[in-house]
Image (tube, rainbow, N blue to C red):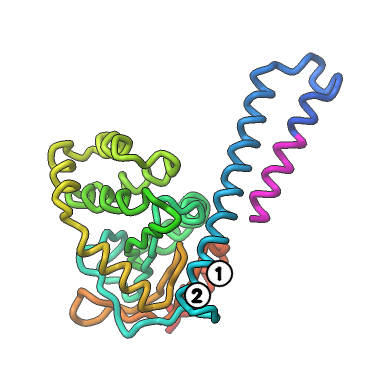
Amino acid sequence: MPLLRSSMVVAFCLLLLSLAPGARGQTPAASDIDAIKKELAAIRAQQEAMQRDITAIKNLLMSQAGGGKLGPQAPSSINIAGRPSKGSEQASLIMVEFTDFQCPYCGSYVSTIFPSIERDYINSGKIRYIVKNLPLQQIHPNAYQAAVAAMCAADEGRFWQMHDRLFANQRQLGADQLEKYADQAGVDRRKFKSCVAGHTHDAIIREDMDEATQSRIGGTPAFMLATANADGTTVTPGRIIIGAQPYSTFKSAIDVLLAK
């Protein structure tokens, strides 16, 4: 939130500068002013969406806890079989993300934090990255169908291409838009529609949601740093990180576990 407020302040200052007499030696172009106004409106809309999420998640957690406080709890193991992944399968440390394609915090994490984790840890083979779905349907009505679309794209090895398009278009996740994004991601249209209509991935998405509930995770994004089990299909979580924390938080936690 502080980062968003700073962005609004910067954009507002630019708008004032553009309107100041003689600031650019000429009358500011109407298109420049319109562009800045649109940027301010987009930032304000994102702030409002995040604030709605905060309120809704707090209410949801309080209702689940019967009015008391409830914190996350690492389970004994979670299933990773069939989940989209990146990185070396031989990596001893696994990072599991529970995500919601309509969640603005998840979108912020994907655009500002994940690239550094990918660069420093995934591409170097130090960790394997797993994505599990946690669509918060009470506050994000299109999140579940977006999760289905992503998993159907994964069937053709195009999960990450679809992942990026969904997060780039979080405000437009209707059925027609999802088919368009599937086309852009290189997914076969006929296979995609058949997968969605057949509810092919409902069971795996519901399992992810159940695991989150059992782990007392009520918001997204949420992360588990875990070690691989011998069966190759489950992992044992060692630490849970909630929210789009600064990169330094992830780096510190990952480095500690890698050192062990």
Q: Is residue 6 magenta?
A: yes
Q: Quadrant of the C terminus?
A: bottom left
Q: Secondary structure at mark 2?
A: helix
Magenta-drawn segment: 1-13
| Separation (CA) of disc 2 from disc 1 | 6 Å
Q: Which quarter of the figure has residue 249?
A: bottom right
Residue 249 is labelled as 1
Across and down, in percent, residue 196 comes to 19, 47
Residue plotted at (79% across, 24% down): 19
Which residue, given by chain and number where applicable, does mark 2 sit on? 253
Across and down, in percent, residue 172 comes to 40, 39
Judge whether 25 appears above or below 83 on screen.
above
**Residue 6 in the figure: left or right of residue 247:** right
Name the chief secondary structure element in magenta. Answer: helix
Q: Amino acid at mark 1?
A: Thr
Across and down, in percent, residue 143 comes to 37, 52
Across and down, in percent, residue 159 comes to 27, 50
Judge whether 33 appears above or below 182 on screen.
above
